[in-house]
Amino acid sequence: IKGSFGKTPVNEIAPLDIVTYLRKLSAQGFSQKVINNKKSIIKGILDNALVHGEIQMNPCLNLPTVKGKAKVERPPASDDDVKAIEAHRSDSDIGRMIYFILWTGCRRGEAAALQEKDIDRVKMTAHICKTLAYSSPTPQIKDSPKTKAGVRDVILPKNVTDNLPKYNNPETYVFFPKGLPREREFQVAIDDFRRQAGITCTLHPLSHSYATMLHSAGVDVKDAQYLLGHSSIVVTQDIYTALDKDAKSKVALQISEYAQKKSLLSEVLSKPATPHES
């Protein structure tokens, strides 16, 4: 926003300027969420200018809607990818981290920021209260995830705790005992592991896989929202609704296949038999 409007006097910014800026974002393939967030920030800046008497009206009000890139449903990781993650879960610290993400639904930055002191091996939980971020190539730890809902205790199944290394120093990063990597190093390590293990999916679908596990285990949507760290239950409900539809589609297919078999059987039984068939 600063790059586009930073040199323009605030009282010279017109509604068309803002719409043009948002349309450029749309043309670049940004999502509706990003475009709405940018628009909200611009409105807040101009509200501040209005309060200070620098403008008489906020030009960001009553603008036409600028649509972003359509939301793409992200399916969970394939069965083959899950099997590959399971098979290589102890190959390296990155392998352990990806396995941890699969079974906890944590985001990449949340898992990377975990320290030994965050792991409770008695209660079998991990306290998620910070995240690894990169505003430059240098790693930075933020004290809390982007929303309050992100601060939570995730449940660690025994297979996950058994796969975690244990360190005497409570400040040691669980998956990066030698220190946090720079941004490029982090991504290269993940890409190398995926290639060597034959994993085709990125890390993001793993949270959807975890949501699928929770749904299959009969975990209530409100509890799933907490475990997944969603700020809005609508996000969790969308995933659960999609899973419900998939389950109903499978049931419909099973009924259809059963009915087809019954129909073929009826045809065979009702057909007059030849002497040979008898």
Image (cartoon, rainbow, N blue to C red):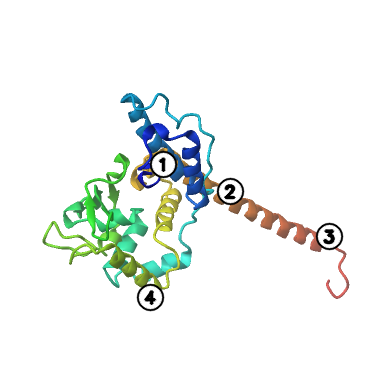
Kindly identify which numbered label has been placed on residue 270: 3
Q: Is residue 227 visible?
A: yes
**Amino acid found under the numbered disc labelled 1:** Lys
Where 152 sits versus 99, above or below? above
Look at the numbered disc 1 and give the secondary structure of its residue: helix
Instruction: Say left or right for 102 vs 180.
Output: right
Q: From the viewer's perspective, is the residue at label 2 or at label 3 nearer?
A: 2
Badge 2: residue crowd in 10 Å (few <14, some 14–19, many ≥20): few
Q: Check disc 4 and give the amino acid type.
A: Gln
Q: Residues within 10 Å of mark 4 (few under 14, many from 20)?
A: few
| Residue where numbered disc 4 is placed | 196
Q: Earlier in the sequence, mark 4 or mark 1?
A: 1
Mark 4 and mark 2 lie on one chain; the one further toward the N terminus is: 4
* Cα distance in 3D space between marks 1 and 2: 38 Å
Say which residue appears at 85% left-offset and 75% top-offset: 276
Q: Can you say whether 149 is above or below 201 in the image?
A: above
Q: Earlier in the sequence, mark 1 or mark 2?
A: 1
Res. 38 mark: 1
Residue pointed to by mark 2: 248
Q: Can you give x and y, in whole percent of width and height, for residue 179 in the image? A: 18, 64
Marks 4 and 1, how far apart at CA: 39 Å
Category of crowding for the residue at label 3, using alpha-carbon neighbours closer than 10 angstroms: few (below 14), some (14–19), many (at least 20): few
Check whether the beta carbons of the residues at disc 1 and disc 3 lie within 8 A of each other. no
What secondary structure is marked by label 3? Answer: helix
Secondary element under disc 2, as helix, strand or loop, is helix
Give residue 161's position: percent from left, percent from top: 25, 60
- Which x, y percent locates residue 4? 40, 45
Towards the viewer: 64 or 142: 64
Q: Residues within 10 Å of mark 1 (few under 14, many from 20)?
A: some
